[in-house]
Image (cartoon, rainbow, N blue to C red):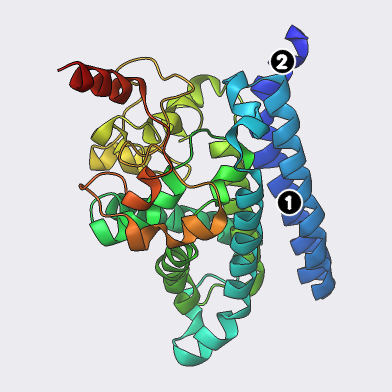
Amino acid sequence: MSALRSIVRYGYAPFMMLGLIGAAYWVVSELVVAQGNPWAYLWLAPLLALAYATAFASEKIAPFFDEWNDHDAHGDMPANFIHLIVYEMQSINGVLLIPLIVWLFPFDAGVWPTQWPLWTQLLIAFVISDFVFMMMHYLSHRFAPLWRLHAVHHGVGRLYGFNGVMRHPLHQVLDMVVGSLPLVIMGMPIPVAVLLGFAISITLIVQHSNVDARLGPLQSHFSIGRIHHLHHVNWGTEGDCNFGLLFTCWDKMLGTFHGKPPREITAKDLGVDEIPNFPKSYVEQFLLPLHYKPGQGEPERYKAHAPETPAQEARRIVDAAE
């Protein structure tokens, strides 16, 4: 078992980021672009399903925390599955809107290097998107209106394969507009946009999965594992760091990179400290931004259903004795 665990730890990220994205690249470049078969895009769906299956299997073999694998105890699978469907449907709709955006913004398509190899165009698109998403992520922690939407992503008490796509639909729309619109206006072709969306989905799975992935000397260069765990801690503002989608270079330039947590992160240290009783249902999470006011504690509608904490119980007993 130890040998298998080592294989998963060191092979998980390369298989997902290079193997599956490479397979998607082959599908798009050889079947769609070279053969002119747009129906071949449908092969990306089973590749995405394989990515989730790989994540869930790897989480069983080499988890960070065994507690995070207890789906029944957390009770978040139904809502997160809906998040997955909404996220992927919005991503597909974003690609379908590209022709409309091009029509609305008829700039010279020559700005985009369409004559370059497809893999080069994908790399350019991913690097630009990584930077833009990082800045959008940073701003989402700085401005209350954005944070109220982004808090839906941070409210979870664990990280596992589905958490990467767990976000408020409106916040996803903002991410897509800010991150993709400049590329589309520049003339990014649809095949590159499809590959970019697939690559981002795989990155989110790897970034949030409960897999003790080992990257060797590259560990501090990618926002995966412990580096991203620190971003999700419920230690007040201590999690306002490591905003990168994949690369940590932007955080290092911005001064928001922290390679090691100030203290050990436990399985219970994730979430939003102001909302310890984060709602489990998709509808309640969708409506959360309407009730949550940053800096004013947990919304009353969730407090009413919250179990009494040990500190609250002690305080009640003391007050009763007095």
Is residue 283 visible to us here? yes
Q: Residues within 10 Å of mark 2 (few under 14, many from 20)?
A: some
Picture residue at 73% right of the left edge, 43% below the top: 51
Left or right: residue 279 versus residue 317 is right
- Give the residue displayed 65% in from the left and 44% down from the top: 77
Kind of residue sitting beneath label 2: Arg
Where's the N terminus, which quadrant?
top right
Question: Residue 48: which disc?
Answer: 1
Q: Return the residue at label 2.
A: 5
The quadrant of the image that shows the C terminus is top left
Q: Position of residue 288 (x, y in %)?
A: 40, 57
x%, y% of residue 27?
79, 59
Report helix, strand or loop for mark 1. helix
Instruction: Work out how far the residue at label 2 is from the one at label 1, CA to CA, in angstroms.
Output: 23 Å
Question: Residue 221 sits in which quadrant?
Answer: top left
Place of residue 267 in the rendered image (x, y in percent of width and height, measured from the top left):
49, 22
